């Protein structure tokens, strides 16, 4: 009697595990199994994994964009028109500089590289640490992390009813398309938010653009060291690299500790590289129409950035303060100018 009961319990457990695995693979919210294609919109898959898998297929890319979700604004088609190179966007949500370094190390071993754009963020890439290895959305491909493939895939079979339910609801329960991912280019798109901005920009700004409540700490030394290693890696292979501080809404810049930010600028140009700085207070960053929220700019801004770094021009903005090429030679002048704008902005705020 006892054995029969035990066998029944064991069978039920295994059936439950089998059903969970079957449902997980069928819905495949992070799209790592590739058997079914249920998740097509609104639920973000594990793009880190998908992009590395894509590049393993040798699609003749010879230029790459590396960085956090903010480099998604850089359209590979625009980059291709300006350079003639076959760019691929490796934007990774919330990526730290340590993660960018890991991807760069994999790229130089496996891909032909003529040019790279490395996007830098004071807050997201240098203050953030690496994500939890159990975060399935941001889990690195095992070829990048060095994890055993079996261990990698087993983690995506773990019991995750809320994730499965949400992926199902967002794909079938909504007519809108708020998120779309193009594996062939690495781009992510937000068509629904573009529609909202076009319909009523003022209402969108009132709802989505706000002063951040975060109090930024000190620069993370691990990520700063990873930046120096990235510079040395590309330099040792004589790869053409453009380092770009991604644009953010002026309200984001306003929330920084300007002395800490200035110290960070001195540190990165101390690697003896030229860096394009697209932050600050100018006609582009002060125009909320250019942003989804204070962290992420829209494609129109990304096109301005690409035009600036590849041609030196910035049309139709015409703002010479948007995109300053800094180095160890002019960094102090740049900081003086940046601090003056920062202090002026805070005086305006305090006078209200």
Image (spheres, rainbow, N blue to C red):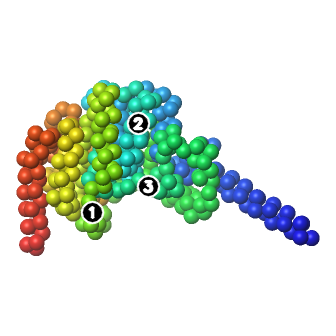
- Checking the image for residue 217, the label placed there is 1
Residue beneath the point at 22% across and 33% down: 310
The answer to whether one can see residue 303 in this image is no
* Tag of residue 240: none
* Element type at mark 2: helix
Measured as percent of width and height from the top left, residue 240 is found at 28, 29
Q: Give above or below for 55 relative to 324.
A: above
* Quadrant in which the N terminus appears: bottom right
Instruction: Please tell me which residue is depicted at 8% across the width and 67% down the height of the picture.
Output: 347
The one of 297 and 94 positioned closer to us in this rendering: 94
The answer for how far apart the CA atoms under marks 3 and 1 are is 18 Å
**Residue, far right:** 1
Q: Residues within 10 Å of mark 2 (few under 14, many from 20)?
A: some
Q: Calculate the distance from the C-alpha at mark 2 to the C-alpha at mark 1.
A: 28 Å
Residue 195 falls in image quadrant: bottom left
Asked whether, in this view, residue 308 is left or right of residue 86, the answer is: left
Q: Residue at x 21, y 63 (%)?
A: 255
> Farthest residue toward the bottom?
352
Identify the secondary structure beneath mark 3. loop
Which residue does the numbered mark 3 point to in the structure image? Answer: 131
User: Can you say which quadrant of the picture contains the C terminus?
Assistant: bottom left
């Amino acid at each position: 009697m006892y054995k029969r009961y035990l066998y029944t319990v064991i069978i039920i457990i295994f059936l439950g595990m089998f059903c969970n695995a079957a449902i997980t693979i069928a819905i495949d919210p992070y799209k790592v199994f590739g058997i079914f294609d249920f998740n097509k919109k609104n639920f973000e898959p594990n793009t880190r994994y998908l992009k590395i898998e894509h590049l393993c297929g040798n699609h003749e890319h010879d230029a790459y964009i590396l960085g956090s979700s903010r480099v998604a604004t850089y359209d590979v088609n625009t980059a291709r028109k300006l350079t003639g190179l076959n760019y691929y966007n490796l934007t990774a949500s919330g990526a730290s500089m340590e993660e960018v370094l890991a991807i760069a190390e994999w790229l130089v071993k496996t891909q032909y590289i003529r040019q790279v754009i490395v996007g830098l963020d004071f807050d997201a890439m240098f203050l953030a640490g690496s994500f939890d290895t159990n975060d399935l959305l941001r889990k690195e491909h095992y070829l990048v992390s060095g994890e055993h493939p079996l261990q990698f895939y087993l983690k995506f079979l773990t019991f995750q009813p809320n994730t499965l339910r949400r992926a199902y609801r967002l794909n079938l329960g909504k007519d809108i398309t708020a998120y779309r991912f193009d594996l062939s280019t690495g781009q992510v798109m937000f068509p629904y938010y573009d529609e909202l901005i076009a319909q009523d920009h003022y209402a969108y700004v009132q709802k989505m653009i706000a002063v951040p409540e975060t109090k930024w700490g000190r620069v993370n030394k691990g990520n700063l060291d990873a930046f120096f290693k990235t510079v040395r890696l590309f330099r040792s292979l004589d790869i053409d690299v453009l380092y770009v501080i991604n644009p953010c809404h002026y309200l984001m810049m306003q929330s920084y500790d300007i002395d800490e930010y200035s110290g960070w600028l001195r540190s990165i140009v101390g690697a003896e590289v030229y860096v394009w700085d697209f932050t600050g207070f100018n006609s582009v960053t002060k125009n909320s129409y250019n942003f989804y929220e204070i962290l992420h700019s829209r494609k129109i801004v990304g096109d301005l950035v690409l035009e600036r770094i590849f041609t030196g021009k910035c049309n139709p903005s015409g703002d010479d303060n948007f995109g300053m090429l800094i180095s160890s030679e002019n960094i102090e002048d740049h900081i003086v100018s940046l601090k003056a704008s920062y202090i002026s902005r805070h005086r305006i705020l305090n006078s209200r």
